[in-house]
Structures are given as structure tokens and as C-alpha cells.
Amino acid sequence: MSLHTGGYVFRIVLILLVSIGQIICQEFNSSFTPDHIHYLQLETKNQFLHAWNSYKDYGFPADEVRPITCEPYGPDYKNIDDTVRNDALGNVSSTLLDNIDSLVIFELWDDLEFMLDYLNSNRDIFNQDTIVQVFELSIRSLGGLLSAHLLLTDVTNKQRIPEKYLRLKKISDNYDGFLLDLAYDLGLRIIPAYKTSSRIPVPRINLAKGVLNVPAYLQRDACTSGAATPVLELTLLSRLTGDPQFEHLSQMTFWKLWASKSKLNLLPMTIDPIDNQWKDAISGIGASIDSFYEYAAKAAIVFNDKYMWSVFKTSYKALLAHSVQGGAPNDGSMIFSNIGIHDGIIVSDWIDSLGAFWSGLQVLTGQLSDAIKTHVVYLKLWDYYESIPERWVFAHFNNRVKGSNKLKNSIALEWYPLRPEFIESTYYLYRATRDPMYLQIGERILNLFKNKFKRKCGFSGIQDIRNGQIQNRMETFVMGETLKYLYLLFDVNDEIFLHDDYLMGSKNWIFSTEAHPLWFNKKMQAKTSTNYTDQDNQDTVKLNKKLYSPVLSLIHSYDSRRENLFQAEDRVYYRNITLPPVNRYSLPSDTLYKKDPLVDRFDTCELNPLTIKPTAFLQSGYYEWNRLFMADHTFGGTLIRPPYLSQSQLDNTYIELTRTFFDKFTMFTGKNERGLYLQSPRISTTEKYELFMGDIKEINEVEITQLYFKHNHNVSSTPVLEGDFWIPEIRALKVLIEKLVANRVDSNDRVITHKYIESVRVDDYNEEGVCSPDNQQYQQYQNQKPIGHTGRDIDIVLRVLKVNGIDIPPGAIIWTLPFIPHAPEPGKESLISIASDNRVILQGNVIENVMVWGGSA
Ligand SMILES: *[C@@H]1O[C@H](CO)[C@@H](O)[C@H](O)[C@H]1NC(C)=O
Ligand SMILES: *[C@@H]1O[C@H](CO)[C@@H](O)[C@H](O)[C@H]1NC(C)=O
Ligand SMILES: *[C@@H]1O[C@H](CO)[C@@H](O)[C@H](O)[C@H]1NC(C)=O
Ligand SMILES: *[C@@H]1O[C@H](CO)[C@@H](O)[C@H](O)[C@H]1NC(C)=O
């Protein structure tokens, strides 16, 4: 069969795929016995070998191999404007440089030795007259070289080496450090990009001829992740070589970017390094800014840098407050969308494929339940599209799309180049939870690799998800990340050295954004830079990170006594509080202390292995989390299965409903007090809306803390329960409100009854409005109160679900200080006032979980 014309190839492949699609489901096993998992791991290695051997035989020493046509692939020298192609390809054997560490992980010792010899005798490999992107070369090639250098110098230098790594030890013993020389050479070619007057790097360089040989129009727009991310690789390069310029210049950029964040602590995505100007006012977590957060967290880990850690925490807090959409505490999913940096208002109705990395980072930084909720959205994308569209529309702002346009409109960018981010996050989630659900996801994707993405010379992604058209390209990250993470996912018994405590346990290593293991310790610090001196380096930047980095205020350090008091109160969330006399305006500091709820988030471990029931054989903990299918409802309007994919069989669509998996892991689950674990909650039918109070720009000045008892407290002396919130001032608040109306299902899966509403409401504010504390201004207000406002719907009670991105769990009360009721316009309801039972009233409706502290009792 001749495979030369693109269209012809495409049609043949499509026909094959349709028939293969039927077979896929029969291959599922989902038993996850040790044998089965070993089989999956071996099969993953076989896929890697297929890709690697194809590259070796048909691509090497070019950057890539083309999977359909088996040709080498590199930069387009004729068209330097094809930056999509040229940015990551520099005729530098990119696939090899991105995969030296993969050869170690997949234990391909002969190839490792061969390739090291090749690189050793091609020291001039970076002397290429091509224009590449600083970011891409930093994460793929520089990161790959540094990782390989660490693996060859700091893994087998132990007393007892497992037998299967004796070969690696031998290779390591013969290794003279030349990869660091190559890394240094590349570093020197990259670093001039940073020597701009703005201290923001230009995005591209010509590897052989330097920055000045790049046309100005290719240097205008740098993205935040592109400018900030190389800080990890470049700092490591400085530490290992002793030449400080890489660290100084890249850190300077990082901190300069951070210093220019908005008042909401959000960074835009595009900057012009020549004009020294931001080019947009949009933030988010996906393309163009993703690895900024990732490297704040990972640089904090590798270099033990508390300032970097504070950047991550501050950013995460800001994203929770502004970027999360929907996300009531009991929602089954979470979307971090793009937002304006000055007002936090949503600006796009899509999320991108790169954003799938976020849940992995959430796991790494301890945000496990957020991670599960973020990940589930991408799981549904795999269910429906067998891939992840580069941009997928999660909600139609304008909801009039119908019929066949639905598919088209649900996909804003239609390709999937076998990106790794979802597998990466699945790997992190499996390591954290050991839930077979994540192995199940891995098995499905492995099957798609074997049956759908496989080509004669590797694997190719999808060019157009809407019709199944494929690409003749295999990016370096397919092996370097996607297959690597899949292989590591199946390493459940820690047989790969990266998971081996003896070899790696003390190293505090991370995966770079390109899945290269990186770490650093003081012993590696170069004593001098005699072997690495740069004649051109005149840079003497001094950096004071303190100036750039206000550390999050820590109100109280972590307290291990914390218990979850809310589970016991399952049935009724409303608390019938009888207020004892309390000292108005101030908290009893001898009894209570305050704690920042976000500090708690980062300091407590969400994992509790003891919650897995010992009686349930291999029960999936994931399935205990019974909101797995809520996302199908939430996004039902824009999850559209393309017609060329099978439509009918559950086995062929839902990964989490594959028959064998479902039968093995969910049929025998037990009950809890509310029914079967598997029982989905009802979809909430209450209305929810967001309310801005005050100037959102002051959001970081607002105190939101949680209240806890000191030891030996006298509980009955205060109406507070542990975990209640303290928000003394009502200003700069973004509040998610649920409107409780009789006969609706609330966000906690409960039907609201008239009786319940009556029990929350007290009578005195129905007609008289505000009950006044003994305060002159209140009295004045009472006197001026408009008359004749009747006809209020007394069957409504409000509930606050979230304040500034912080979940208010069921049962918790928000306490606030007495305030002057917002003066109503004549004839209108006052916006906000106080009832006789101290609950706060919003536009005539009582809020069940906001109370004024120390009002009249
Ligand atoms: C690409 O690199 C190889 C060495 O790896 C070199 O021989 C070849 O000339 C380069 N191609 C171009 C067009 O510069
Ligand atoms: C520096 O170079 C010298 C001579 O090439 C070599 O003997 C020495 O080991 C090198 N030092 C380091 C730290 O690489
Ligand atoms: C606890 O406080 C209540 C109310 O203030 C008081 O009546 C009671 O005696 C106190 N108990 C103790 C042990 O101090
Ligand atoms: C609230 O407490 C009061 C006094 O203890 C009681 O009379 C009333 O029935 C309670 N209300 C509810 C809804 O439990």
C-alpha cells in the first residue's frame, strides 16, 4: 500500500480506526492484580520502544521522526515565520535530548551508552543557524541535559546498588560530566536573551548567531510562562557550574514579573520585552501562564525557597477567589477560567488542554480535593472526545447553539498532539490516593495508544477532533512525558528507581515541566567556576527577593488538634443558637484564636488512608466520592461526542463505566448513612448567584479567618463552634449565595421544606425590617426607615457557600461585627441589615449562616 498522499492516508486510517474501535473494549481487563499491572507496564514500555526505535531508525539525528511517513523532521529553514514548528526544533536532536532520562527510566542501557557517545563526540551540537524559542529549548534540551547529568552523577553513588542498576552504575562511573558542558554551552547561547534593558527576556534566539540575528517582529510578545519558567533550569545551571549569571538574570525576570502583579495578585499572560509593557490584562492557569505557578512551587521545593513558595500560595489564593467558576463546595467539578486581572471577571468560555496539568500541581501542593475536582472535567473530555481539544468550551455564554453546530461550537481549537498533562495529573492522583480509578484511566489511554494513535513510525496526535483527521508529527514530549508518566503510573510497587526510597528518597526531586527529574543539594554546589567562565559576562545583578515578596500573613501556626465537627451534624445544618451575653466587638481571646483558612489548606494533609473500608475488597475510594457524574450534568450542553466515534456502548465511551471495571470495583461497595456510595446526589435545583460587595480591589485587605478554641476552653461560654468564620467587615467580598426556596434540592442534596425555612426565619424582620441594637445610628436608621414595604416572599432563605474563594462548609457560621445597615432608597428594601436573632438580612431575605457578633441578646 502506498502511503504518499495525505488525503489517501487519512481515509485509510479512518476506516481502520472505526473497525478497531469495536475491539478496544474487549481488551479491557481492569483486574489490576499484580500480573495485570505488570502487563500494562510492559505494554507501555513496548509503546515507548516502538516510538524510540522509530526515531532511532528514521529520525535521528534530526529533531523528530514523522510517524506516518517515517521521515526525519526538523526546523523549516526556508520559512522562519513558521514558529509553531521552529520554536521547539533547532536541528539539535531534540527528541534525544528530551529523552536521555527516559532511556534511564525505561532501562535501555545500550541505547543510553550509544547516545552518550554520540553526544560526547558532537560537542558542537548547539551551533545551529536556527531561530528557536528560549522557553522550549530551556525546558526540553537544557532540562533534559541537566536531568541526565544528575542521574549519571547522583543516583548510583551508593553502597548497595540493586542488581538491575549495575549497568547504570558502570555507565555512570565512566561518565565524565560532559553533559554539563553541553548544558553550559546551551546556557551561554540562551542567556543573552535575558540581557534586555527591561530585564524581560526576548522570546527567541538564533542558536549560532545570537539575539541580534532574530527579526524584531519575532521578539515582541513573550508569554509569562515563557519568560518566567526557565528560572528553575537556569538557577540549577548556575548552582552546578558556579557561573552565577543564569540564576541572577532569570530570577531577576521572575521577580520583576511578580512585582508587577495586579492588586488582585494576578499576573497577565503577555509582555513585550522591548517596550517593557504588559500586552494584555488576562490571567488564568492554562497556556501562556501555566508553568509560572508550577515553577514557583517546584523551585520552592528544589531550592528550599520560601519566597517562591509564597508566590505559589498567594497565586493560588487569588485564583481561588477569582478564577474558579461555579465551584460551590459540593459541586462535582471545578474550572479555573481566564479572568481579568483587575476585576476578576471571567473573559473566556473555554479552558485549554495544557490546563490539565493543574490537578497534578494541586496534588503536589497538597490541594487534593481541588485536584480531584479539576481532573474530573478532563476525564469527561476523554470520555467524549477520546482526547482533549486544545480549547474546549465549557459553557456557552450565548446559549442558542443547536444541532450539528453543537460539536463545532464546543471545540474552540480542534487538535490534540498527544499532550501529556492529563496523564501527568492522573499519575500524581494515583500516587496520592492509590485509587484504581486512575489505573483504569491509564489502561484506557494505553489502549488508545495501541489501537488509535499508533502509526508505522511512532504515534500521531489528532489534527481535528471533530472529524478524526490525524497529524504526521510526534512531538518530543510524547515519549518524554506522555509515555513516561503512563509507565510511572503503572509502577505501583515502586520498582522504578525514581520511586525507590533508598536511591531517591532523600533527594527532594521534582519533575520539571517537561517531566525531567531534577533536584539539588548543597554537595552539588560548584565551589568555583574555574571550569565555567564566561568572558562576556559583565552582569552583576543583585537581587533582594524580600522586596518583591510579601509573605502571606500567617495568623496562627498549624494546630494538629483540629477535628472535623461537621460530620456529626449531618441532618440539619442550621444551628439553633441561643446567644449568651458576649463582649461586643471583640472576640474572647482567652477562649478563641483565629487561623487563616488558606494556611490550613497548605498545612494539613487531606489524605486519610484509614477511611478506606477494610471490609470492601479493592473498593475504589474514588467511587466513594459520589459526585463523579455531576460534571456530566454541569457540562452536558458542551460535551458532544463526534459522530465518527462510537456512540452507543458505555464500554466505548465512559472510562469510569467500563463494564469490567465497574463490576469489579463498584458492585460490592457498602452503604453509608445516606445510602449506597454509588448513589449520585440529586442535581441541585436551587438558584446560585455571585454578589460583589464593596471594591474588589481591596480584597487582600479583608480579614477572613476561622475560629478555634484554645486548650481548656469553656465551650458553653460562646456560641461559636470550631471552624466558624470571622469576617469582621463586610467589604471587598465576592460571595456565592444559594437561594433556598421550599421544594428545591439544595447543594447538599437536601429538599428544602417550608418547615425548615420557617425555622430559620424569625418574625420580627418581616414587616419591621431591622431590629436595632442599642446604637444611636441604628435608632436613626429606624426612624428614617421607609414605610409600606410589604409583599416580601417570606419563603426564601439565603445561604453563603463561598466568600472570596473560600468554601463555607455546611454548618459553619460566618460572624461579622455590627454594621450600619445600608441606607435604603426611599420605598426600597435596604440592601443589608440585621435581624433580632442577629442574622444578617440581604435585600429582605435572611442569610442563615451569617450572624452579627455581640448584638443584643
Ligand atoms: C543539522 O545538524 C547536523 C549535525 O547534527 C548538520 O550536519 C547539518 O548540517 C545541520 N543542518 C543544517 C541545515 O544546518
Ligand atoms: C575542571 O577541569 C579540569 C581539567 O579539565 C578537571 O580535571 C576537573 O575535574 C574539572 N572540575 C570540575 C568541577 O568539573
Ligand atoms: C462555662 O461558661 C458558662 C457560661 O459563661 C458558665 O455558666 C459555666 O459555669 C462555665 N463553666 C466552667 C467550668 O467554667
Ligand atoms: C430553637 O431553640 C428553642 C429554644 O431552645 C426551641 O424552642 C426551638 O424549638 C428551637 N428551634 C428549632 C428549629 O430547633
Image: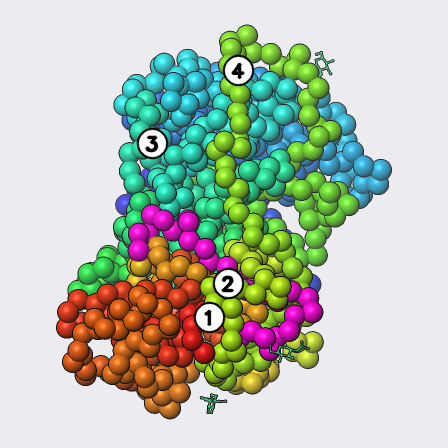
Residue kind at label 2, given as amino acid type: Ser
Residue kind at label 3, given as amino acid type: Ile
- Under circle 4, the secondary element is loop
- Above or below 567: residue 388: above
x and y, in percent, of residue 486 in the image: 56, 52
Q: Quadrant of residue 605?
A: bottom right
Residue 586's tag is 2
Is label 3 within 8 A of ligand 1 (CB to nearest ligand atom)?
A: no
Q: CA distance from mark 1 to mark 2?
A: 8 Å
Is label 2 within 8 A of ligand 3 (CB to nearest ligand atom)?
A: no
Q: Residue at x 48, y 20 (%)?
A: 191
Single out the mark in the foreground, 3 or 4.
4
Of residue 14 and residue 375, the one placed in the foreground of this image is 375
Label 3: few (<14), some (14–19) or many (≥20) C-alpha neighbours in 10 Å: many
Q: Is residue 504 magenta?
A: no
CB atoms at circles 3 and 4 under 8 Å apart?
no
Q: CA distance from mark 2 to mark 3?
A: 46 Å
Mark 3 lies on residue? 271
Mark 4 lies on residue? 540
Q: CA distance from mark 2 to mark 4?
A: 52 Å
x and y, in percent, of residue 364 in the image: 57, 50
Label 1: few (<14), some (14–19) or many (≥20) C-alpha neighbours in 10 Å: many
Q: CA distance from mark 1 to mark 4?
A: 58 Å
Question: Of label 3 and label 4, which has the lower sequence position?
Answer: 3
Residue kind at label 4, given as amino acid type: Thr
Q: Quadrant of residue 15?
A: bottom left
CB atoms at circles 1 and 4 under 8 Å apart?
no
Of residue 601 and residue 514, the one placed in the foreground of this image is 601
Single out the mark in the foreground, 2 or 4.
2
CB atoms at circles 3 and 1 under 8 Å apart?
no
Mark 1 lies on residue? 854
Q: Which residues are magenta?
A: 694-719
